[in-house]
Image: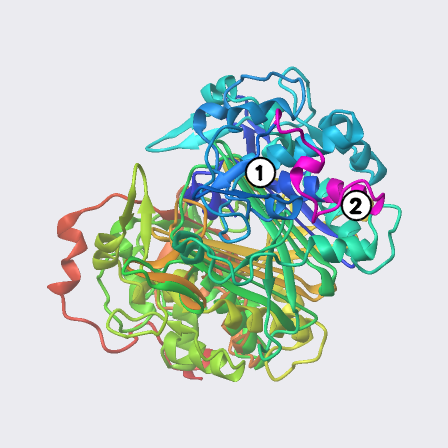
Amino acid sequence: MKDLMNKYSIPGTVIAFSINGTNVWTEGFGYTDVENDVITHKDSVWRLASISKPLTSALIGRLMDKKLIDLNHDIHKYLSPDFYPYKTFNGSAVNITVREVMAHLAGLHFTKLEDLYDVFHGVNSSQPIAQFKDEKLLSKPNTTFSYSNYGYHMIGAIIEAVLNSTYDKEIEKMFRQLNMNSTFAEKREAIYKHRPQYYTFTDKLEKAGIYDELVSYEGQWPCGGIIATASDLLRFGNAMISAYNGKQNDFLSQKTVKELWTPETIGKIKPKDWIDLLGPFEYAKGWFVKNIPVSDPYPYRTINWHSGGMTGTATMFLIFPDQNLVGVAFANNGNTEVPGAVIGFSINGTNVWTEGFGYTDVENDVITHKDSIWRLASISKPLTSALIGRLMDKKLIDLNHDIHTYLSPDFYPYKTFNGSAVNITVREVMSHLAGLHFTKFEDVSDVFHGVNASQAIAQFKDEKLLSKPNTTFSYSNYGYQMVGAIIEAVLNSTYDKEIEKMFRQLNMNSTFVEKREAIYKHRPQYYTFATKLEKSGIYDELVSYEGQWPCGGIIATASDILRFGNAMISAYNGNQNDFLSEKTVKELWTPETIGKIKPKVWVEVLGPFEYGKGWFVKNIPVSDPYPYRTVYWHSGGLTGTATMLMIFPDQNLVGVAFANNGNTTGFGYTDVENDVITHKDSIWRLASISKPLTSALIGRLMDKKLIDLNHDIHTYLSPDFYPYKTFNGSAVNITVREVMSHLAGLHFTQLELDWNHVYRGKKQKLLTSWPHMRAGGHQAV
């Protein structure tokens, strides 16, 4: 999540899910006030922007149940011609129905910026009608989808006319009935607990304050002026599902909910830019609707959703009524861009939703495929962790062994810290507790082009440790390069060959270690955004993803990562021993960082967190009202990509999200140059999500007894390959466990760019063997 927020330039965000009517996860990340270091509260009150429309739709539904409004009536049944004149189109008189207004089929304009200004300050929702009442229609009613905030101003005015009351008073009655006690029609002068500051980003992060000064949120209530917590919006979503199932008639009748969710735009004209952005879509009455053909393999049939965006805020609200699943996401930076994205969920082992949005190639209009192959970035680490787990099951790796059980001191030297010798275990490496550095930018350059994961060790083997092993969480890509080297040493094979064996066993047939020369179907183009959208091509030219395989160099589809998550849950429950044993999964997911020093910036961004072996871990106190107890997750970020993987094992829930702009938000294209719209199966760079995959591979070696997390890394790597280390003058050991837990004292990744250094690999002879492997013991395996 830290990677995502940094790359998106998002100060703060809240994410929430409910299943079967129960809030299983609501979490705040980052800051709601950057200037005052106010950490995002899970109950922050957020501007919903256009998610206000589904709430307005529900209020109309209540009036339908009371026979006060009929969707098929002309709007002039409720509004006088003096208030809103009769209209013509191409010289002929036309009628406009309530149904058409709610479905954006009335031919109304969108919104002029000046009409958002503070003209009608906190009076009612009817007065803004004066802003557009004399405008000509864009199209004949009931022919063309033209998304219009003005339309929902009109719906607010109809509500006020029917009830002879104000919109804010009536909508808040509905909120209180649903126990949505932190949801309000926003008023400028009011004080709301946990309301965030709002920000924009062009070339730097800035407050959106001037917009707040200009805009009348009171005038925007029905279309975009509601504020709420994520928990309250989950309550609303669950109430909609309950009413849809005929179980909450005091809120809405089943008939009315189904009416509100019935698409109105089938067969109507839709603007190309909307289709390009969303793919095939329909709109009902206040809701976007995605209906899935019966021939589609996914079991869900309908998604009802809405997103929202204003300067300083971006929001998303999803309801899967047949799966009783509701999702919410808020962010307090609303003007960033992502060309393309893929989102996927699975429940109880079944992929219930995988969808591509936008473009994988903007310039060539290539629409994002649901099976786009994405760079996972640091999600590669959980995959590497799984491979280690397989070796643990085979008794080939022991997390408690020193890394030098597997690596010779020539390969990676013994270390000292403060003048004393120290050991580094596999456990410490996997937990980022080995004192290793992050990563220098020149060390991700194209030095070791597609040979093996071990050669990358030369980049950092002589560096001093940042901290004494097993004392401090220092997130380190170097650590997972070391884990990859251990895997190669133990198996006398290459990381890419071994991890791909694991992928194929799990039917992850669109997951690969990325190689520059290879062609992958549905691979997106990657973009960055500062003041404008740009290709991240120069980074691709410089960076060696081959050298990053264990920590960030895996690419995959969302569907494949869902398969991986489900395999982890199945093994966790003792049902997939051919992949990983139950004991090993629990070992990989056991936090290593409890009681260790954690950098302030990590705690501030993530809140209280722990790290296992290739996985971030969030354990929820029993006193917390949410029923879930544990979330295992990893995010990933590289220039041009941002990724997220979440596993809730006790709820059998897996979630995945990919985007092809590593510093922005939104949906769109996987290739801007070719207008390739994002496919839900685009193959994506996982970035740091590669770490959980690497972790799984380590787990497989643990199961085979080839790797022990407690062994010093020099059990597997020679001191020539990675020298022994000292810290503060003392020799120290680094274990595999510490490296995997980012406790090895290794550096992160520095971004300095030395052009001579970048191209040094083109002048050097590539190694073709593993000099760090030693004869005897585990090394002989």
Residue topped by disc 2: 64
Amino acid at the residue labelled 1: Gly
Q: Residues within 10 Å of mark 2 (few under 14, many from 20)?
A: some
| Residue 590 seen | yes
In terms of image quadrants, where is residue 598?
Answer: top right
Q: Which x, y percent locates residue 17? A: 68, 52
Instruction: Please tell me which residue is depicted at 49% across the width and 52% down the height of the picture.
Output: 144
Q: Which x, y percent locates residue 310? A: 50, 34
SS assignment at label 1: helix
- Can you tell which mark lies on residue 151? 1
SS assignment at label 2: helix
Given residues 265 and 682, the one toward you in this image is 265
Q: Earlier in the sequence, mark 2 or mark 1?
A: 2
Amino acid at the residue labelled 2: Met
- In the displayed structure, 735 sits above or below 129; it is below
- Can you tell which mark lies on residue 697? none
- In the displayed structure, 454 sits above or below 67; it is below
Q: Which x, y percent locates residue 122? A: 65, 18
In the displayed image of the protein, which residue is found farthest to the left? 763
